[in-house]
Amino acid sequence: MKIRRFENQDIFNIQNVVLQLGEIHVWCIQWFSLLSWILKYWNIMCNQEQKEAQKFSNYNDQMRYAAAKILTRMLLSQYLELRNDEIHIVKTKLGKPYIQERKNIEKIQYNISHSGKFILLAFTRFAEIGIDIEYIRPLPEYLEIAHNFFSLEEERQIKNSKQQSIFYYYWTAKEAYAKAIGTGLFANFKTFSINGNNVIEHGKVKTGWEIVFLNMNENYVAHVAVKYQ
């Protein structure tokens, strides 16, 4: 699949963006530069989303949440050629959001992640997808976490590297895959491992899956996971 990347300036040209079959659109948004835009389009969120936004006591958390919800609806409206009020987003039992299917509506999968100053949104047609980003912050217990939750080979790679960034490399790759299959943090991270672009489960490469590293700035690590049809 071809990955097309979009950033803040592309938000103001959404009406010309088309999601083609075989494409993944990744929107890398620095939300703190869009505060006036968020307030301007606040009512694009549905009533429930606005209520959820108001629950955040921290202003930055509220704005980050709202930016992701507003942009998601704008993009789904553009990709599906629907009015915003025709888009109904629901969640699975484990919390993965998806568009409630309607007759004659093309299937689009999407996923969202945020950390620090970034929001990442990934969209594709007819394929399972997950995305994850993490800010590389000091984490004294990272080796213990790797031991408890990662495969033996992943733990070995992290130990040998002596770099926390490698821990975050594996974490975001595994989380992106877990989000794509709909389990998220409910997944048992020890039951699968990441080897390059592949997912390994029970000693075998999982057919059809690809893990793609997203080049961010030096303080962030991100991956997208996709299952080709």
Image (cartoon, grey):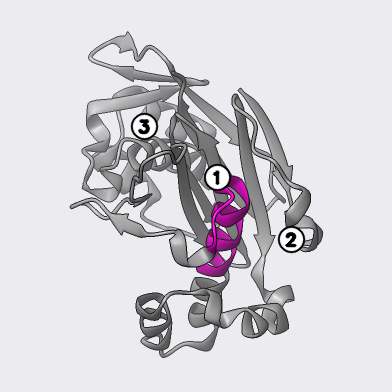
Amino acid identity at mark 1:
Ala
Q: Is residue 55 left or right of residue 59?
A: left
Could you say which is closer to the camera, residue 166 or residue 45? 45
* Number of the label disc, if any, that sits on residue 155: 3
Q: Residues within 10 Å of mark 1 (few under 14, many from 20)?
A: many
Disc 3 to disc 2, how far (Cα)? 39 Å
Element carrying mark 3: helix
Say which of marks 3 and 2 sits in front.
2
Q: Quadrant of the C terminus?
A: top left
Tell me where residue 183 sits by quadrant: top left
- The residue indicated by pointer 2 is 11
Q: From which residue to which does the magenta span run?
A: 68-83
Sequence order check: which comes first, mark 3 or mark 2?
Answer: 2
Disc 2 to disc 1, how far (Cα)? 14 Å
- The residue indicated by pointer 1 is 122
Say which of marks 2 and 1 sits in front.
2
Element carrying mark 2: helix
Dominant secondary-structure state across the stretch colored magenta: helix
Disc 3 to disc 1, how far (Cα)? 28 Å
Element carrying mark 1: strand
- For image coordinates 41% across by 25% down, the residue present is 194
Task: Name the spot of residue 51 as percent of width and height, x first.
Answer: 37, 84
Task: Name the spot of residue 203 as percent of width and height, x first.
Answer: 27, 10
- For image coordinates 43% across by 82% down, the residue present is 50
Q: Is residue 43 left or right of residue 227?
A: right
- Furthest toward the left, the residue is 93
Labelled pair 3, 2 in contact (Cβ < 8 Å): no
Task: Name the spot of residue 1 as percent of width and height, x first.
Answer: 60, 22
